[in-house]
Image (cartoon, rainbow, N blue to C red):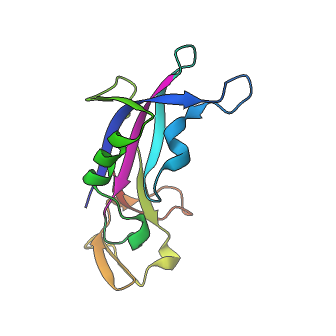
Amino acid sequence: MTVYRKIYKCRTVGSKAEGNLRPEIVDRLPTGINCCVLEYNEAEGWAIVEFFCSDHPLLEEKFRKGRDDLERLRADPSVIETLATHPNSPPVLGGFAIRPELAEAIDETAGEVMVRGVRAKFVRKSPEPRIGLIIDEG
């Protein structure tokens, strides 16, 4: 139950001038894997991309992905190399939250929420009311 992260150097498609510069792999990402571009080099045709996902039990099955799913991205033909770290990688890249109206029960004293019959801890309440309870982040 965590947010998994992996950094790859990937080939890009499109152009900044046309407003469609992006890592080629984003067109083929499985549901549940998200990404953040940390650096572009349009002249050389690559981007440093950090991918992230979670296998938290509160996520719907189709959105649950784990470390192995991120490792499998390495086989994509647009991936050039794997990087251990990058200076632009933020401490918290992503996460997920539950809006309070979707919860069956919230126990603020214990820091727990129940959704679809699954009870889980939440990290904190978001200061933004429409976001609700931060379940996992990393």
Q: Is residue 52 magenta?
A: yes
Tell me if 74 is positioned left or right of 47 in this view.
Answer: left
Q: Is residue 21 visible?
A: yes
From the top left corner, tell me how far across and down residue 128 is, in percent.
53, 57
Q: Is residue 89 magenta?
A: no
Q: Residue furthest front?
A: 77
Numbered disc total? 0
Tell me if 85 is positioned left or right of 9 in this view.
Answer: left
Magenta stretch, residue numbers: 46-55
Q: Is residue 138 visible?
A: no
**Does the magenta stretch mainly form a helix, a strand or a loop?**
strand
Q: Residue at x 47, y 59 (%)?
A: 31
From the top left corner, tell me how far across and down residue 64 is, in percent.
36, 64
Tell me if 10 is positioned left or right of 83 in this view.
Answer: right
Q: Nearer the viewer, residue 37 or 110?
A: 37
From the top left corner, tell me how far across and down residue 115 is, in percent.
39, 79
Picture quarter with the N terminus: bottom left
Q: Nearer the viewer, residue 113 or 67?
A: 67
Position above or below: 116 against 45: below
Q: Residue at x 48, y 50 (%)?
A: 29
Position above or below: 131 against 49: below
From the top left corner, tell me how far across and down residue 50 is, in percent.
40, 37
Q: Residue at x 57, y 13 (%)?
A: 43
Q: Residue at x 48, y 74 (%)?
A: 100
